Every structure is written in structure tokens, then in C-alpha cells.
């Protein structure tokens, strides 16, 4: 994710994220986070800032699922 700046858009299948920056070697994204993971309600539902290492319902990280980025 080096080369991306605050506000650049990142895409994965069915999901759009905004690059939020890097702090202490960890990249962060701003995105909508759904409440259902592995068939259980986690209580999370809304827009959050998370590290790119966050795992989605399929067990994969946001970073591993990135397909495209658009710089503004």
C-alpha cells in the first residue's frame, strides 16, 4: 500500500474502502464493517477504521483481497 495517500479508494470484490494512512508500519482503512462473521452476530455494524489485517467472514484479510486502488 505504499504510494497510497489518505482518501485513495481501494477495492475488493463487493467492498469499497478508503485508505486512511499508516501508523507504526500498520496500514489502516475506513470502510463499512458488517456484523455477521462465521454465522455469528458480532455486534459490529457501521463504518470503522481498521487495520488492513482485519479478517472478513471468509477468513481472508482485507489486504489479501485487494484487487484495485484509485489515487485521487
Image (cartoon, rainbow, N blue to C red):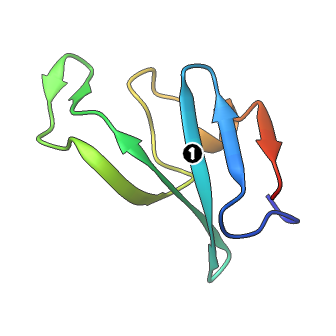
Quarter holding the C terminus is bottom right
Decide if residue 54 is on the left or right side of residue 6: left
Front-lying residue, 55 or 49: 49
Q: Residue at the location (19% across, 44% down)? A: 44
Decide if residue 44 is on the left or right side of residue 56: left
Q: Residue at the location (62% across, 20% down)? A: 13
Q: In which quarter of the image is residue 49?
A: bottom left
Dot 1 crowding, Cα within 10 Å, few <14, some 14–19, many 20+ = many
Q: Residue at the location (79% across, 43% down)? A: 69
Residue linked to disc 1: 17
Query: SS for tag 1?
Result: strand
Give percent across and percent down for residue 36. 22, 25
Looking at the image, the residue that sits furthest to the right is 3
Q: Is residue 53 above or below residue 58?
A: below
Q: Is residue 24 above or below residue 26?
A: below
Quarter holding the N terminus is bottom right
Decide if residue 5 is on the left or right side of residue 63: right
Q: In this view, does 55 lie above or below 71?
A: above
Amino acid at each position: 500500500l505504499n504510494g497510497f495517500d489518505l482518501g485513495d479508494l481501494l477495492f475488493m470484490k463487493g467492498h469499497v474502502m478508503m485508505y486512511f494512512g499508516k501508523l507504526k508500519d500498520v496500514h489502516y482503512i475506513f470502510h463499512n464493517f458488517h456484523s455477521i462473521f462465521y454465522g455469528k452476530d458480532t455486534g459490529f455494524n457501521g463504518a470503522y477504521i481498521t487495520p488492513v489485517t482485519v479478517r472478513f467472514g471468509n477468513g481472508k484479510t482485507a489486504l489479501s483481497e485487494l484487487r484495485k486502488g484509485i489515487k485521487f
